[in-house]
Amino acid sequence: MPTRPTPPPTPPPSAPKQRRGKRSAAPPVAPPAGPPPGWQAPKGYVPVPVRRRRRWPWLLLLTLACCCGCPAYYGFPISAQYPVQAALPAQVDDLKLRQDGRSAEAARQLEKEVRGEHLLAEGTFAGVYSTSGGKQVTVFGGTGFRWSPESDAEAEISRLTERYALDAPEVVDTGVRGRHERCAVGRSNGGDVVVCTSVDHGSIATGVFTRLSVADSAALLNTLRAQIIQPKA
């Protein structure tokens, strides 16, 4: 009986072909090796964990301060000083409002002038006050929104410089944020006077004072404007 031939050996299976364009996965990285067995830290060594600084809370606080704090800082004086209204009281301390014809006519002329110089004024006022001792104060001004009180105060003193032959104006610290005041010494009707103007975001008030120093004139103007100018109800 003939012998059957032995079949050739089967070749081993070939490895699957790797697709072009894809890299083989990197082998996993072994975690850092710990200290060898029996290792002891040197005497006095204290391990300090390294903390990663988190900056986002500070950035968040800074953003909130810029978005909320700045508008509040600049907006508070405006809301406190505008809108307002003006009315002349009959008496302020020892000063009495003069109602005679000459004083009333002078007040009307001043109020007309204020209206012409401050076209955007919402209201105007003017009056002449005096004391039994002969001290006289003429006050005039207007109400209405003002974006730049400091510039308006300088402009008002500059406008009155020629009329009252004013010296260089002095800056007066009002102690009120958003309110600026200037005072200067001059002459009127042959006598010395002090002219002060006080401007904030809602009003302008100017006073011409006789027989008073610059400091006393500035203080009295603040007293007068506190009585004349009031927030709108």
Image (tube, rainbow, N blue to C red):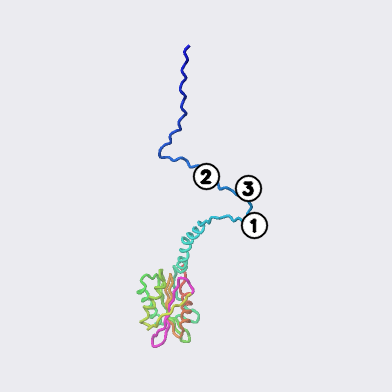
Residue at 50% x, 42% y: name it. 27
Where is residue 185? Give x, y as percent: 42, 83
Residue 192 lies in the magenta stretch: yes
Q: Residue furthest front?
A: 2
> Which tag, 1 or 2, sits closer to the chain's start?
2
Q: Residue at x 37, y 73 (%)?
A: 118
Spatial separation of the CA atoms under disc 3 and disc 2:
22 Å
> In front: 145, or 111?
145
Residue identified by numbered label 2: 29
> For the point 39% across and 88% down, which residue is it?
190
Distance, label 1 to label 2, CA atoms, is: 33 Å
Instruction: Reply above or below: 144 against 32.
Output: below
Give how far across and how far down residue 191 sits, in percent. Answer: 41, 87
Measure the alpha-carbon separation of dots 3 and 1. 18 Å
List the residue tagged with mark 1. 43
- Membership of 191 in magenta stretch: yes
Report the span colored magenta: 175-195
Task: Bin the neighbour count of mark 1 within 10 Å (Cα to Cα): few under 14, some 14-19, many 20 and up.
Answer: few
- Name the residue type under label 2: Val
* Disc number lying in front (1 or 2): 1
- Left or right? Give the position of 101 relative to 62: left
| In front: label 3 or label 2 | 3
